[in-house]
Image (cartoon, rainbow, N blue to C red):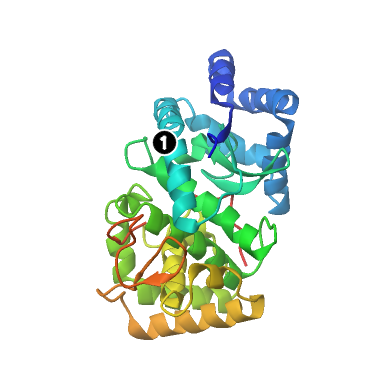
Amino acid sequence: MPEPSVVDAFPAFERFWNKVAGEPVRQQVELWDREFRVRWPELREKQIDCYRAEGVDWATVARTRVFPFLEARLARMRALHTDLLRSLPRALARTRQVLGVRFPVRFVIHVGIGCGAGWATTYGGRPACLLGLENAAECHDGGDGWSRRIVAHEVAHLAHQHWRGEVWEEVPDPWWKLYEEGFATLCEREVEPGTFPFRTGNADWLRWCDGHRGWLAQRYLRDVRTRRSLRPFFGSWYRIRGQTEAGYYLGSEVIREWTGELTLREVAVLSRPAIRRRVRATLVRFAELGAAPRSRSPSLDATGGASRHPSPVVGQTHRKVPSRSRTGRPPSGT
């Protein structure tokens, strides 16, 4: 298998930042826009379109949530960049082996405007993972396995689309959202089980989620029913009782529940009506059961099936928690 295709925009960002670090934030954002418009037009348009679809002004987010913190996070971004380049080939090979996929993937490493540490999309007409160091550096420093987890999570999104024969960006359906992110997060957990508990940078995250699984299911059902925003479940800039990204955990628990009777690939191609029914029914069951049981569901074998024994590829399955690690762009509400 050839080496991963990598578009590395980070060195260009460092040169850009050396020139503008002392400028006012508003000027920095304007210069970033000008630089990306010329050098990385597709990358710029994807990010701006992402905010536009949410009805959010991208420049305001960049000025208030991203650029004021870039200087302080530059050392972390450098460490993450180094770790990504070192980890990518092996992480991609491991993920392909576990999922049983071989399609080409392009990785774009960049510093953007807060659209996510990971984003499964297309770039240059090819399936691609956009890896935003500005988001990753909020919680990670390159030493907690983030690079391997984000590759597994985003490639799992691409595999999901590949198996369904569909390409989507953001689907405004709360049941689909939990299913889609849960699918990728379960794959991430299987590919990188040893470091999954450090997914958010909080060592207590998985233990807290396990202890509150029933409550999280109740909260998700309530928020869907009352049409509240789901951002607290999926956005790294939002929290539920102090915890970020609880929706990724909850979704992976839902999908894990299904793999007792379905292979991962069968889960991937369920019809949308079936997905909605199953997700809601599983959340109702979790809400009735309360905390996650100590006895976990079987791990997935390398072909996506259920196995009563640890996968020979992944090894012993551990519980834990990215990508979009915000494995993702600014998440939509309901």
Residue 240 horizontal/vertical position (percent): 41, 62
The furthest residue to the top:
19
Task: Name the residue rendered at 66%, 58% in the picture.
Answer: 170
From where the camera sits, is residue 132 visible? yes
Residue 136 to residue 245: above or below: above
Instruction: Determine the secondary structure under disc 1.
Output: helix
Amino acid carrying label 1: it is Ser
Tell me the residue at 68%/58% (across/down).
168
Is residue 106 or residue 25 the one in the foreground? 106
Q: Position of residue 50 (x, y in %)?
A: 68, 48
The part of the image, by quadrant, that contains residue 41 is top right
At 41% from the left edge and 63% from the top edge, which residue is drawn?
249
Q: Position of residue 252 (x, y in %)?
A: 44, 66
Residue 136 drawn at (x, y percent) = 46, 40
Q: Which residue is mark 1?
A: 87
**Visible residue check, residue 324:** no
